[in-house]
Amino acid sequence: MVAITLTRDKSQHAGNALDDYPAPTTRTEAEQDLRYGQMAVVIHQGEDWPSGRLCRNCKARWPCRLQRWGFAVLVTAGWTKDDVKRLLARARAGEVPWA
């Protein structure tokens, strides 16, 4: 089983913070992007490779830009780490949570 790390710590990824997608700054804005944030967090999960932890979707160093953006959307919308863990568990069980 792959461990899930939920963090907004920008120091964990290689790259410039300016490379990040702009995240919503208000709860209202975040709620408008909620479906896409959920999709980004579910689809852009980390996998361990000999070269390090990479995104299983885009193969960028994990957490990748879309995972960071999606997580920021969920947190800004009021989600907790437990909420995100439940979302990921539902997705692993074959449910499409955003449908």
Image (tube, rainbow, N blue to C red):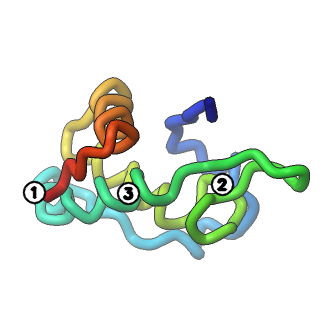
User: In what element is the residue under mark 3?
Assistant: helix
Q: Given the image, on which type of amino acid does mark 3 rest?
A: Gly
Q: CA distance from mark 1 to mark 3?
A: 15 Å
Name the amino acid, label 2: Trp
| Relative depth, front residue between 99 and 12 | 99
Q: Mark 2 = which residue?
A: 62
In the rendered image of this protein, does residue 99 appear above or below residue 75? below
Q: Which mark is residue 28?
A: 1
Q: Position of residue 52 (x, y in %)?
A: 83, 50
Which residue lies at the image location 41% right of the left edge and 52% below the top edge?
41
Q: Residue at x 71, y 56 (%)?
A: 54
Residue 70 circle label: 3
Position of 31 compared to 13: left or right? left
Badge 3: few (under 14), some or many (20 or more) residues near its Cα, within 10 Å?
many
Point out the image quarter for the C terminus. Answer: bottom left
In the picture provided, is 14 more to the left or to the right than 37? right
Callout 2 secondary element: loop
